[in-house]
Image: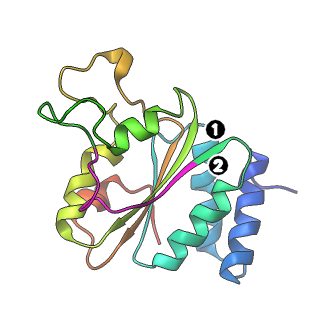
Amino acid sequence: ANPYYDSRTDSAITEFRRLSQSECTSATSELGHVLDYYYTRALAPAVVVSNDAKFISNFVEAVSIQKGVNVISGIDPDDYKMIRSLYDPVGSPNLRDDIIKFGRGSLVVVELTCKSKNAQLLIREMIEDTPSRSAFSSNKSALEKDGILFAVHVAGELTPEIRSRASIIL
């Protein structure tokens, strides 16, 4: 019997195991539950954190092939803005607007690579469970976090800010 509520969870975990060449472990089982909460929008956002870059890459690939899931990969917060500031020109590339472009209610997986402690600090507002707003934005333009999954590779030690916002650390 399928232990998950959403069939995409079982499919994604099966694909993740294939890509990782790993067996069912308690970690993959816990990861499956986080994924199930993501698909059913019980986690807003879901945040998966690991020091293992290949783990995050395999996970993003496994989730991104599921029905109805959009993906943004390869984001380094040290090189790419998380949110447009008041002084940035309209249309300046930033992750918040990239996610919003998929449309309210879309399922989006975002792969982040934090190579520095500064990068971890840059993503803290993005991965917390409150709507993300730019300066002078309205409730209508706020980025709601349900349907968003952040897969975060952290090189080095986790900051308390990331640790406290993670749904699961593997």
Q: Badges 1 and 2: C-beta atoms under 8 Å apart?
A: yes
In the rendered view, would you say 35 is above or below 106?
below
**Residue 120 figure quarter:** bottom left
Residue with the mark numbered 1: 40
Give the residue displayed 51% in from the left and 69% down from the top.
56
Residue with the mark numbered 2: 36
**Relative to 95, is 30 on the left or the right?**
right
* Residue that extends furthest to the left in the rendered view of this protein: 87
Question: Mark 1 belongs to which amino acid?
Answer: Thr
In the rendered view, would you say 10 is above or below 55?
above
User: Callout 2 environment at 10 Å: few (<14), some (14 to 19), or many (20+)?
Assistant: many
**Relative to 116, is 153 on the left or the right?**
right
Rendered location of residue 116, percent (x, y):
22, 71
Rendered location of residue 131, percent (x, y):
34, 31
Magenta region, residue range: 71-82
146 inside magenta stretch: no
Give the residue displayed 76% in from the left and 67% down from the top.
14
- Viewer-nearest residue: 155 or 38: 155
**Residue 157 figure quarter:** bottom left
* CA–CA distance in space, label 1 to label 2: 6 Å
Rendered location of residue 8, percent (x, y):
75, 50
Residue 24 in sight here: no
- Viewer-nearest residue: 54 or 17: 54
